[in-house]
């Protein structure tokens, strides 16, 4: 039987997402009521981090523990990873010693090659191309607050990064429209968008992209791995801050999301991220609940 991986949102059907979200609601309720729930007793998650993390590590490690299992953290500094061992060999070896693997790495090709040689499910904890766990938690958070996202308009304000490409896949799966505004030089690579996908609009002006939307999304301007370009980015992104003026172009009940960490005064004003339309803390917490349901489903 083929092993089910979660390397990008397109790996799951809408039915699978709906199932996992229903499980996440149940698992979240149990967590809030301090109920012991150990479906993954004696199971082991291996977490491989080639890039740093706060939320992803914490949510997977705490989540696996809460489900009764154990989580093992590996990084490239304290292991043989990154010292020339072929990724295919790592996939073979690691998957013989655990029940599920989460990887945060640079290239999507790396995680795909690893998964092709793994005997257990592999979850993408962020690559340069996709961040499926985050966007899945974001969609779940939107639905918690406002009901179905189908038919809604969502704005992306920022560069075309891994989050945006996952939002593009989410638009296809959950049937909403994405307004995308990217600064010059940081536009969407249309070769990465399926030709048949039409439910998005490209904007030069970030305020216009926010017009009439139900959700405004942004992300840090200096993503991991691009720190050297920081000054050039700050210049190019001038005017792209999500502030109250942009939020006021959205629908009155629009939400604001940011996957965090955030830089107040750069990509978002303090007034917006700390204001009544912001759901960033729920969004961060829901990484835990969605990923617990994902672990349960895949294991
Ligand atoms: N949003 C997110 O993935 O956060 P971390 O980089 O802290 O894991």
Image (cartoon, rainbow, N blue to C red):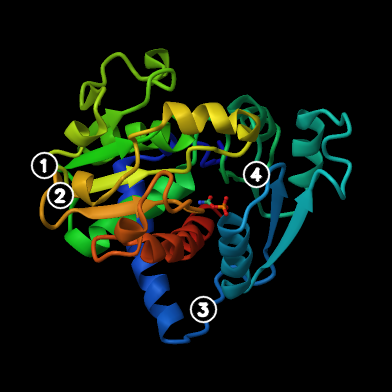
Please report whichever mark, 1 or 3, sits nearer to the chain's N-terminal start: 3
User: Is 116 above or below relative to 122?
Assistant: above
Q: Does the residue at mark 2 contact the one at mark 4 (Cβ under 8 Å)? A: no
Residue 207 location (% of width, % of height): 21, 36
**CA separation in Å, label 1 and label 3:** 42 Å
Check disc 2 and report the residue beneath it. Answer: 248
Of marks 2 and 1, the one in the foreground: 2
- For marks 3 and 2, give the CA distance: 43 Å
The mark that comes first in sequence, 3 or 2, is 3
How many angstroms separate mark 2 from mark 4 (CA)?
38 Å
Q: Residues within 10 Å of mark 4 (few under 14, many from 20)?
A: many
Count residues near mark 3 (Cα–Cα under 10 Å), then give few for <14, some for 14-19, many for 20+: few
Camera-nearest residue between 81 and 180: 180
Q: Quadrant of residue 147?
A: bottom left
The residue furthest bottom is 34
Q: Nearer the viewer, mark 2 or mark 4?
A: 2
Residue nearest the observer in this picture, 131 or 210: 210
**Label 4 sits on residue:** 103
């Amino acid at each position: 039987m083929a092993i089910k991986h979660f390397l990008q949102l397109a790996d799951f059907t809408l039915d699978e997402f709906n199932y996992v979200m229903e499980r996440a609601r149940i698992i979240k309720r149990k967590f809030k009521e301090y109920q012991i729930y150990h479906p993954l007793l004696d199971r082991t998650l291996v977490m491989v981090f080639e890039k740093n993390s706060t939320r992803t590590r914490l949510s997977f490690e705490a989540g696996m523990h809460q489900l009764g299992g154990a989580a093992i953290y590996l990084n490239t500094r304290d292991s043989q990873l990154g010292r020339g061992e072929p990724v295919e060999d790592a996939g073979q070896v690691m998957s013989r010693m655990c029940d599920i693997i989460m990887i945060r790495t640079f290239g999507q090709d790396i995680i795909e090659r690893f998964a092709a040689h793994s005997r257990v499910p592999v979850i993408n904890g962020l690559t340069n191309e996709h961040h499926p766990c985050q966007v899945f938690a974001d969609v779940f958070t939107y639905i918690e607050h406002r009901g179905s996202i189908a038919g809604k308009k969502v704005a992306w304000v920022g560069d075309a990064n891994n989050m945006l490409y996952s939002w593009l896949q989410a638009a296809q799966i959950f049937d909403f429209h994405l307004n995308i505004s990217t600064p010059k030089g940081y536009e969407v690579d249309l070769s990465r968008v399926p030709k048949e996908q039409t439910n998005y609009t490209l904007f030069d002006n970030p305020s216009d992209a926010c017009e009439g939307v139900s959700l405004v999304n942004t992300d840090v301007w200096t993503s991991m791995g691009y720190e050297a370009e920081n000054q050039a980015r700050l210049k190019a992104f001038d005017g792209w801050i999500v502030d109250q003026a942009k939020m006021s172009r959205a629908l009155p009940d629009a939400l604001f999301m940011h996957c965090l960490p955030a830089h107040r005064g750069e990509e978002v004003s303090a007034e917006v991220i700390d204001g009544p339309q912001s759901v960033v803390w729920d969004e961060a917490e829901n990484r835990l609940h969605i990923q617990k349901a994902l672990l349960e489903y895949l294991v």
